[in-house]
Image (cartoon, rainbow, N blue to C red):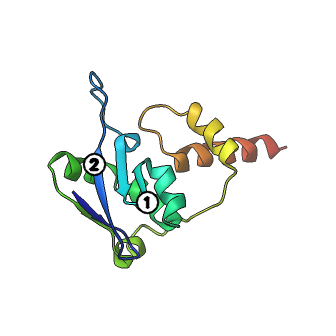
Amino acid sequence: MIFTNSQGYEYRIRLDVPEGQDLIRLDNIRIDHQDRPNMTLEEYFAFADAEAERPYFEFMELEILDSLREGNGLEITKDDLNSLPKEYVNIRIYREDRDRLAANMKYGETMAEKIHALIERVASEDQP
């Protein structure tokens, strides 16, 4: 399947689901480029300098996975990125911290929800 990113570059995109795994997640997406085959999304974001697409993948996760399961390709445009709800913004976080957060996340929980919960907890601790 063809994947056209927000910068207009084409890649191959597919789902790589290990046998016996029922649940399909963003972790199962593989993106191929002639110079870098079999990339995870994390590797793709770094390789393609496409960090701006991360919120789109997170926000549209179910729709993207359904589309890939049905054998459709994927195209992300600048308008798609601009159409995200304004409460989503890109932030920089150390990879080690992100990995620690992800290790403690429950199924279906987003990184945004996890960070929001931590901020709320800190705010409540600051209350006299």
Q: In this view, does 91 lie to the left or right of 31?
A: right
Q: Where is residue 20 in the image (x, y as percent from the top left)?
A: 27, 21
**What is the quadrant of the C terminus in the image?**
top right
Q: Which of 123 and 43 is in front in this view?
A: 43
For the point 43% across and 67% down, the residue is: 85
In three-dimensional space, the C-alpha distance between marks 1 and 2, rounded to whole angstroms, equals 17 Å
> Does label 1 or label 2 sit earlier along the sequence?
2
> In the rendered structure, which amino acid carries the disc numbered 2?
Arg
Q: In which quarter of the image is residue 90?
A: bottom right
Residue hosting label 2? 14
- Element class at badge 1: loop
Residue hosting label 1? 35
Nearer to us of marks 1 and 2 is: 1
Q: Position of residue 37 (x, y in %)?
A: 39, 51
Q: Position of residue 29 (x, y in %)?
A: 35, 46
Q: Is residue 127 in sight in this rendering?
A: no
